């Protein structure tokens, strides 16, 4: 099925010449990231979100909602394909918060985008729910540092015994004053049924963090980041100044999701305690 590109571009507030160029990739990526919030309310409310394109359009494009990585990046891949880019879907191991020696499963969806005329593909990801998320895509190369708004990113090789090169995305100043690991990945292609399995696990496993508490993220074009984890609301400025406060109850959480994250929820929504 094909995406309603007009409706999608209106949702993210992007207008321009619809050609598969690097400038278009960068600007559409930024517009999606800043235009549609990250949120996991479906799993918290007891359902696994659908990854079917019509359902993603109904929710994220027309419904005033956000989603998590599988939803965002599945929708974004469809939009980029409609614009003429070639996409390779990947999975990654999240490294944020991991302890040394931890081996986490591949539960994050990311992708590579090929741009006609460019020698390298670009790591493209609008669905990483972290302050270290990409504002714009980065080339698949080591030693190249990219800057977008207040964010700095780079890719490095990581030690690995497997047959494929292991890449690691790093963000500068996300949690420390140095380079912080975000996730690791290889370029092995994954297909839609793979994400259906991972999505079901993440949404329904009682030990999954995404089924146990509310997570929401929003990044502005200037690089200001707003994060909600449970009832803890954190705002981080482009200069890394941080403000935190604890929300009183589920009703205030819902009010903040509507007012500060721009998430349109049905009347009568009640969060589990």
Image (spheres, helix red, strand yellow):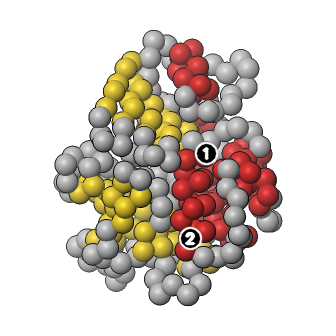
Q: Position of residue 197 (x, y in %)?
A: 58, 56
Horizontal side of residue 15 vs 29, given as left or right? right
In this view, 153 is above or below 88? above
Q: Position of residue 256 (x, y in %)?
A: 54, 23
Label 1: which residue?
A: 36
Nearer-the-camera pick, 79 or 184? 79
Nearer-the-camera pick, 124 or 165? 124
Q: Of the residues tagged 1 and 2, which is closer to the observer?
A: 2
Q: Residue at x 28, y 71 (%)?
A: 156
Q: Residue at x 49, y 13 (%)?
A: 249
Nearer-the-camera pick, 18 or 244? 18
| Residue 259 in view in this figure | yes
Q: Position of residue 1 (x, y in %)?
A: 80, 65
Label 2: which residue?
A: 23
Q: Residue at x 73, y 20 (%)?
A: 267
Q: Position of residue 112 (x, y in %)?
A: 51, 72
In this view, 74 is above or below 238? below
Q: Residue furthest top?
A: 248
Could you say which disc has been placed on residue 92 in the image?
none
Report crowding for label 1: few under 14, some 14 to 19, many 20 or more residues within 10 A (C-alpha): many
Report crowding for label 2: few under 14, some 14 to 19, many 20 or more residues within 10 A (C-alpha): few
Tag 2 or tag 1, which sits nearer the N-term? 2
Nearer-the-camera pick, 194 or 231? 231
Q: CA distance from mark 1 to mark 2?
A: 20 Å
Horizontal side of residue 131 vs 74, given as left or right? left
């Amino acid at each position: 099925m094909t995406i309603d590109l007009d409706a999608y571009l209106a949702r993210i507030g992007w207008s321009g010449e619809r050609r598969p160029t690097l400038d278009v990739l960068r600007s559409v990526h930024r517009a999606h990231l800043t235009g549609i919030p990250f949120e996991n309310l479906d799993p918290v409310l007891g359902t696994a979100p659908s990854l079917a394109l019509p359902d993603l359009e109904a929710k994220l494009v027309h419904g005033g909602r956000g989603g998590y990585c599988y939803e965002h990046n599945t929708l974004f891949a469809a939009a980029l394909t409609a614009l003429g880019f070639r996409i390779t879907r990947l999975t990654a191991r999240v490294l944020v918060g991991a302890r040394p020696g931890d081996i986490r499963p591949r539960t994050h969806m990311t992708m590579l985008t090929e741009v006609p005329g460019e020698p390298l593909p670009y790591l493209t990801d609008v669905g990483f729910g972290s302050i270290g998320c990409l504002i714009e895509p980065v080339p698949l190369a080591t030693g190249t540092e990219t800057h977008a708004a207040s964010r700095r990113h780079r890719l490095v090789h990581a030690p690995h015994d497997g047959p494929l090169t292991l890449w690691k995305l790093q963000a500068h100043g996300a949690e420390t004053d140095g380079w912080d690991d975000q996730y690791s990945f290889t370029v092995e292609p994954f297909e839609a049924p793979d994400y259906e399995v991972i999505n079901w696990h993440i949404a329904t496993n009682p030990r999954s963090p995404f089924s146990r508490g509310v997570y929401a993220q929003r990044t502005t074009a200037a690089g200001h980041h707003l994060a909600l984890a449970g009832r803890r609301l954190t705002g981080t400025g482009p200069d890394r100044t941080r403000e935190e406060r604890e929300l009183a109850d589920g009703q205030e959480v819902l009010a903040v999701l509507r007012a500060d994250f721009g998430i349109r929820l049905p009347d009568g929504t009640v969060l589990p305690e």
